[in-house]
Structures are given as C-alpha cells and as structure tokens.
Amino acid sequence: MKYYAYIQNGKINGVGSVPQVTDGIQSILISKETYEDIKQGKKDEYIYKNGEIIQNPDFETIQAKIQNRARIDEIKIELENIDKLSQRASRAVALCIINNEPPNPDDIEKLQEFENRAEELREELQGIEKNGVD
C-alpha cells in the first residue's frame, strides 16, 4: 500500500492512501510511519520542504514555547486567585490596625503563606519570560 501526504498552500493538510486529484492539493509519497504519525495528530512534527515531507527541526522549540505560554497563563490565574483569597485576611488585619488592635495571628500566617506562594510564582513567571516565549 502507498501512503500520501496532501499539501495545500505549502502545508500538510492531511494524509491518505490514494493521491489527491483536487486542484491546489499536491500528493507526496510518504512512509507508513510518517502516515501513521500524521494520522494520529502528530502533523506538527513534520513539514513540507523542497518537495518532500521531513521532520520539523523546530518542533521541540515550538512545543516548548507552547508549554511556556500555557504555564504563564496558569501562573497568572493562580496569582489572581491568591489576590482574591487574601482579601478577607487583608481586611481583617487592616481593621485591627485601624482600631489599634493586634491582628489575629492566623490572618497574618495566612497572608504570609499567600505572599510566599505568590513570590514563588512571580519568580517562575520571570524566569519563563526571561527565557522568551516567542
């Protein structure tokens, strides 16, 4: 059996076992392994270059950037949640200070835990952004 990658506008558009005859779609003969990879959703691991299908030399870099962007989003969400969760304890401490009363040690401890976690996340975020995501 023969296997083909279908190329449209210079990019892999799909795979099949018969050549395409549609205008604007080119059929390139590929190995069974490449066919299976692309069929199973690993299309980004391959590119069309100089008339053939080859492994994408930038695939790992692209995947790392995608993962970094996803982690940045996760960190930002967690930081927003920390801000929301710390509001009650912050208000309680602020009210005690305004009323010249000692704050509840549990509130102080909770705020310190939130701040420690936020600091860890900000450092991680800074490291990811320093290394670049584009």
Image (spheres, helix red, strand yellow):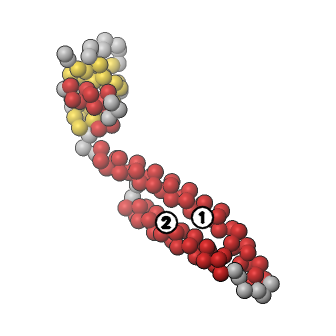
The crowding category of the residue bearing disc 1, from other C-alpha atoms within 10 Å (few below 14, some 14 to 19, many at least 20), is: some
- Secondary structure, mark 2, is helix
Q: Nearer the viewer, residue 3 or 6?
A: 3
- Secondary structure, mark 1, is helix
Q: Nearer the viewer, residue 29 or 118?
A: 118
Upstream in sequence: badge 2 or badge 1: 1
95 left or right of 40? right
Q: Which mark is residue 105?
A: none
Q: Nearer the viewer, residue 28 or 109?
A: 109
Where is residue 17 shown, x and y percent of the image?
Answer: 26, 16
| Residue at (35, 18) in percent of width and height | 24
72 left or right of 8? right
Outermost residue, right side: 99
| Residue at (20, 17) in percent of width and height | 2
Determine whether 119 is above or below 53 in the image: below
In the picture, which quadrant includes the N terminus?
top left
Q: Which residue is mark 2?
A: 121
Q: Quadrant of residue 110?
A: bottom right
Where is residue 52 shown, x and y percent of the image?
Answer: 21, 29
Q: Are marks 2 and 1 in contact (CB under 8 Å)?
A: yes
Distance in Å between CA atoms under marks 2 and 1: 10 Å
25 left or right of 112? left
Q: Nearer the viewer, residue 7 or 105?
A: 105
| Residue at (25, 26) in percent of width and height | 35
Amino acid type at image mark 1: Ile
Observer able to see residue 26? no
Q: Which residue is mark 1?
A: 82
91 left or right of 16? right
Where is residue 102 shown, x and y percent of the image?
Answer: 72, 86
